[in-house]
Image (spheres, rainbow, N blue to C red):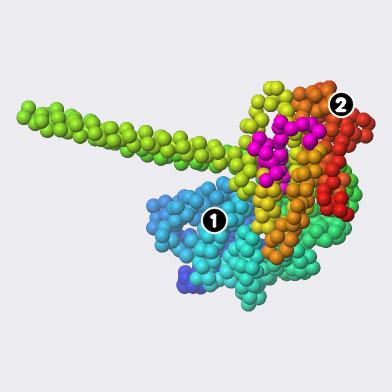
Amino acid sequence: MAASASAAQAASPSALDSRIEAIELAGRGQPLAAAADVERLLQSSAAFSSEQLELLTAKGELLAAARQADAARALLRSLDAWRGTVHADDAATAALLVAARIEIENGNMRTADGLLVKTAARMRADAPARLRLRILAAHAGAKKELGELEQAMRLYQEALAAADALGQPNWRVDMRCGLARVYLQAGQPAHAERLNREALVIAEASGDHFLLYEVHGTEGVLLDAANDSAGVRREFEAALEQARLAHAPSAESLALSNLSDGYLKNGDYKTALAMAQKAIALTRQLGDTDGQVVSLFNAGVALIALHEIELGKRHVAESIAIDERRGALSSMSVSYNELGSYLERAGDAAGAVLAFHRYRDLTDAIVRRDEQKALIELQEHFDAERRSRELDLLGRQNALQAEQLHRQALQQDLWWLLAGLCAASLAVLWWLHRRVRSANTLLAASNRELAMQGERDPLTGLANRRHFHGAMASADAQGFAAALFLIDIDHFKSINDRHGHAAGDGVLVEVAQRLSAMLDSGDLAVRWGGEEFLVAIRNRRRDDTETIAERLLTALNARPFAVQGHTIEITASIGYASFPLAPLRLPVSVERAVQLVDAALYLAKSNGRNRACGISSLLARGDGELDAAASALGNAAADGRAVLASVRGRLEMAA
């Protein structure tokens, strides 16, 4: 890729574009070698020229992709020398872009998003087309990873138009594959498939192995969403072959991880383990933390499925520890949920309970974080408006004071004008006072509306955990007194996988409506999180609890739920109890009551689902004995400390 100094100076802009395109295409597989090629071109470029800035930007992105963060930051420092030059604005924009790319490769998506917002704001309206495309592509990818799909879709569409205008195959394929994955996440698989077919045509015409790897990998993800297991394996194997032909170790490790996941879903745990172990070796060699998270987790659950439980747990713990160091709560939550399922199938009930408890704790933390963030953002908006009003009022008051000083210098014959001006000023002040009072009234109303919305689940309209804890706040002082029913929709993940997330959301709304229809006005139905609901019933006789559990099972399975020409049978597992518990009627806190019915729910799921398991009585003389019983409710029933009741669902009884 190197060229002599005279040849580089004589090269036309189109020739330089072609060289950069070739380098970046090779850099998809081997970014560090491509960065060295760019450095050779830099040595013969004119100082502080637009060509030199383009090369520096390309080198910065390649160093970030190769995870050479120190070298990339050194390049950022070199861009400081561009201050005061003709291209100073573009250099500052490029520096922000490279800094964001470093954060993206380190997994700090929120920090990268903030930098890219500043980058877009600073970018000139007539900035170079390739620089604009780089910024759009980076920002779209960050928004996709953050789950902000609407903004990711808009940015990818802009980037796709810019890539087509530029005409380079690598950008055209990248933007189509990225947008296809966003469409898939947004529940639009047909649009995703169309875009990936376009990407395949472009990649095949280019003959580049890395672009073919990218298209086959995306196709594997699309087929996985369509539950085409044979197609998934075929496409991921093709992606692995193209990654090897491209001599791209990082792409090869990701393809191995994807293949491992495909074999896991098909129950071929030995092959899945072998693939995951190869991926672990590659990701450790490359220092690829994202790849290590996936490959370690896949190896761990494969070992658990092969009944090497302790070794598998250690692999999964190492994977989760990486996410914990990065603060990736959502990824940790998903890992704990899947770990619980694998441990449950492997017969490690105690480990499964701990994993599911950790999953629920993380889900709570994510909900609290998101709610707090929304409140802070809204309050900042109101504070900004208030400051603007205060500055406006202060400016008017300063003008009034200046006018008063001016009036004092007027002659005696102008006093009649002064009186008129004073009257007008008083009218203005009164008007401003009324405006401020009106604005404060609107702000108070908005705060009340925000508080109400913060206690409602936006999908189902039911109360959320915050509302439940607020409604039950007085119970901790006197002991909780109510019947609690913790409800988990059976096989909800299968509904999402088979029919799509829109159908899953429809099932959640239908369940909420069926619960609300059978409850009295004094009862409380709560969206507890994910596919879980909580029902709290007061002022009912204790012997009604089992009857209510049976009615809940019947109401949920009263009729199939119709979606997209298919019908879905809704069944649920329920854990329940009436507090204070017989026979000693020991006062129980709200949190401990929820833990007890959660333990009963786990027994209902373990015994085949589509049933309710209730705690009729529990012999416990203190919080310690209650906690011990909640951790091993089955053992407590076996040794006579607990008496359990079981109610089977309508479908179960018919069978």
Mark 2 packing: few (<14 Cα in 10 Å), some, or many (20+)? Answer: some
Q: Image quarter for residue 636?
A: top right
- Which residue is identified by label 1? 151
Q: Is residue 174 visible?
A: no
> For this view, does 554 lie left or right of residue 190?
right
In front of the other: label 1 or label 2? 2
Magenta segment: does it hold 541?
yes
Secondary structure state at the residue bearing disc 1: helix
Q: Is residue 58 placed above or below 345 in the rendered structure?
A: below
N-terminal of the two: label 1 or label 2?
1
Mark 2, residue position: 619
User: Residue at the spot x=86%, y=38% of the render?
Assistant: 645
Task: Indicate whether 269 appears above or below 453.
Answer: below
- For badge 2, the amino acid type reads Leu
Residue 569: percent from the left, percent from the top? 77, 56
Which residue corresponds to the image point at 63% horizontal and 48% vertical from the top-left?
460
**Any magenta on residue 322?**
no
- Label 1 sits on what residue type? Gln
User: Extreme left residue here?
Assistant: 413
Image position, residue 195 (x, y; %): 61, 69
Q: Residue at x 60, y 51 (%)?
A: 146
Q: What stretch is highlighted in magenta?
A: 517-545
How far across and down, in percent of the image, does residue 46 sit?
Answer: 45, 63
Please give left or right for residue 344 compared with residue 54 in the image: right
